[in-house]
Amino acid sequence: MDRFKMIFQYFQSNSESVMNGICGLLALASVKIYNSLDFNCPCLPRYNMMYGMGIMFVPPIALFLCGLILNRQSVIMIEEWRRPTGHRKKDLAIVKYMCTFVFTRAMVAPVVWILTTLLDGNCFVCAFSGSVDPDKFPGFANSSSPETQHLLYKVPCKEDVLIRNNTSRKAVSRYLKCWSQALGWGILLILIILAFLARSLKPCFDQTAFLQTRYWSNYIDIEQKIFDETCCEHARDFAHKCILHFFQSMHNEMKVANFTKKSEDEEDHIHGITDKEQVNKLLKYWYQSKPPLSINYPTQRQHIKGKSNGCCLEDHKQTDV
């Protein structure tokens, strides 16, 4: 169980290579899901458009949400925005960088899904078969208007008796698939050009602000992970000592079970915080009063004395985050 937990935490890390790998897996999963999808157009007026557009755009929303869930930085971005300023000033550039990082990667799988549906063309044919001009196709030109419209909606259902022997059914289907594929390749070309321009023009701009923003974005992520690890260490020692205190009257039984205190050589993570109220005050202080981003002053200790005392720290100047 611990191994799976470690793997999950590893994939939630802030490493760009890991996040790119996750986005790639989501993109491959979107293609696999689409290929295994049992596509059945209803071939009915008003429902064709709803079904075709639904298949094209509803799954990308779910894939986008999955991308946000798997990206640990999306939660950190929201927390950083809503968290009180404390000993730091809010830097909107960092939040914007996080937002760009999160949304660009979360959009990979949805874009792949949309491009796949357009290049395949079946959704497009289902959605717009009733919108083509029947005069362009001889097999529909001589029919009455209501009958023609009804036949056009039947174009995606090639096994339907009414449309199966119509000579222009394949022509309408090819016509719509050509438009769908042209649209798909056009979108793909635009995305490639934008990515090329972003890569090519990036060295032309001053990288100082970008490097600073990227550094502090990574710092916020690492700081949160180290704080969580420290809390886990403290919670483990706190629980260990509470249990030892509870079983103090059962010293002999504890010896039999080898449940004894840790040796003095082992590291103590309690740091003088010894009851629930002190822990709650410490966590509240961490959230509301961020530690200043400076290590030029002596190591500061938080003096929490009893239930009547709060967390006390010397005041420091605000530092940019």
Image (cartoon, rainbow, N blue to C red):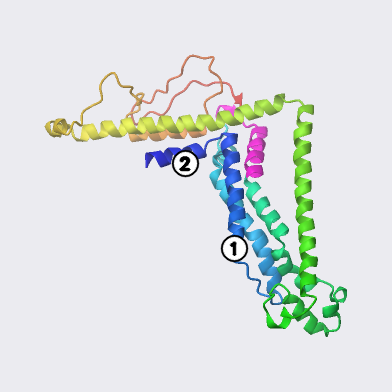
| Vertical side of 126 occupied by 203: above or below | above
Gap in angstroms between the C-alphas marked 2 and 1 = 28 Å
Picture quadrant of residue 258: top left
Residue 203 position within the rendered picture, expressed as x and y whole percent measured from the top left: 76, 27
Task: Verify CB contact (< 8 Å) between mark 2 and mark 1.
Answer: no
| Vertical side of 248 occupied by 60: above or below | below
Q: Residues within 10 Å of mark 1 (few under 14, many from 20)?
A: few
Q: Residues within 10 Å of mark 2 (few under 14, many from 20)?
A: few
Circle 1: residue type? Leu
Tally the numbered discs. 2
Give the residues drawn in magenta, as a range: 86-105
In magenta stretch: residue 97 = yes
Residue at 44% x, 24% y is 312
Residue 61 position within the rendered picture, expressed as x and y whole percent measured from the top left: 62, 55
The tag on residue 261 is none
Residue at 33% x, 23% y is 268
Picture quadrant of residue 153: bottom right
The answer to whether residue 233 of the structure is visible from this angle is: yes
Picture quadrant of residue 102: top right
Question: Would you name the residue on which mark 2 appears?
Answer: 8
Residue at 36% x, 30% y is 234
The answer to whether residue 107 of the structure is visible from this angle is: no
Question: Would you name the residue on which mark 1 appears?
Answer: 37
Circle 2: residue type? Phe
Horizontal side of 6 relative to 188 (left or right) equals left
| Vertical side of 129 occupied by 234: above or below | above
Kindly give the residue lying farthest to the left in the view shown: 252
